[in-house]
Image (cartoon, rainbow, N blue to C red):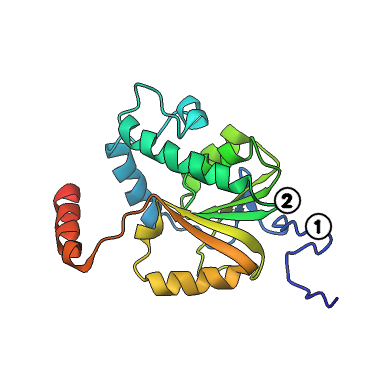
Amino acid sequence: MLQQNIPGINLQDSIINFTRYNNDEGVFILSPVTSTFENVYLKVREKENRIYSDAELLMLPFASSSNPHKNEWDLRAKSFLRFKEYLKTKKQNLNLLDLGCGNGWFCGQLSKTFNHHFYCVDVNLTEMKQGRKVFNSEQLNFIYADIFNSEIPTASFDIITVNAAIQYFPDLKRLLDRLIKLITATGEIHSIDSPFYSKSEVINAKNRTMVYYS
């Protein structure tokens, strides 16, 4: 069998090794760190009361009764449990990439049950550092990376999840083209908990967004 030499890949066990990159408090840095987006994003999340304590993060998506977004998290918990049941049908030792991971709760919770290799990717260094500290599992790799301009090895992931994050990408086709290059020949892409609107609803959705952020 011909084996392709892919940078960063250990062909013996398919674990993707990012240790050659610099890290900041356990987060591997694959792209230049820029605070422009993150500062604005964190201000919005703080205003929305979405910056969680370590104790609350450890519970998500099973939010406490004091969580101001408990109703939303109850819905996301259902999605999480459905995906968790689906993952039970898969083989062990998968490579799973979670794009737009935020504080890493999704893979953090999955790592408690499954013996997979989880790669949490975002451009939100602050919350990834929190996730690295809170979940502290050898199965979890937190990676600061621009998905379009970083050395994430292609054809390497069995599953890619975009969990309540696909709306942050302005060009869906470009995103999917990129993700297809990152998955294996039998790999899967799962978009979870992001709304898709019909053409007749797009304008109303955009207007609601403008009103909300104003």
Residue shown at 49% from the left, 74% from the top? 177
User: Which circle's residue, 1 or 2, is located before the other in the chain?
Assistant: 1
Q: Can you identify the residue that label 1 sits on?
A: 13
100 to the left or right of 184: left
In the rendering, which numbered label is found on residue 191? none
Q: Can you identify the residue that label 2 sits on?
A: 93
- Please state which of residues 175 and 7 is positioned toward the viewer in this rendering: 175
Quadrant where the N terminus is found in the figure? bottom right
Residue type highlighted by circle 2: Asn
78 to the left or right of 86: left
Tell me, yes or no, whether the two marked residues, 1 and 2, touch with CB atoms within 8 Å.
yes
Locate residue 194, reporting x and y percent: 36, 53
Can the viewer see residue 151?
no
Residue 39 sits above or below residue 74 on the image: below
Residue 187 sits above or below residue 92 on the image: below
- Please state which of residues 62 and 174 is positioned toward the viewer in this rendering: 62
Locate residue 155, reporting x and y percent: 65, 70
Residue shown at 81% from the left, 57% from the top? 13
Task: Count neighbours of disc 2 (C-alpha within 10 A) and say few if under 14, some if 14 to 19, many if 20 or more.
Answer: some
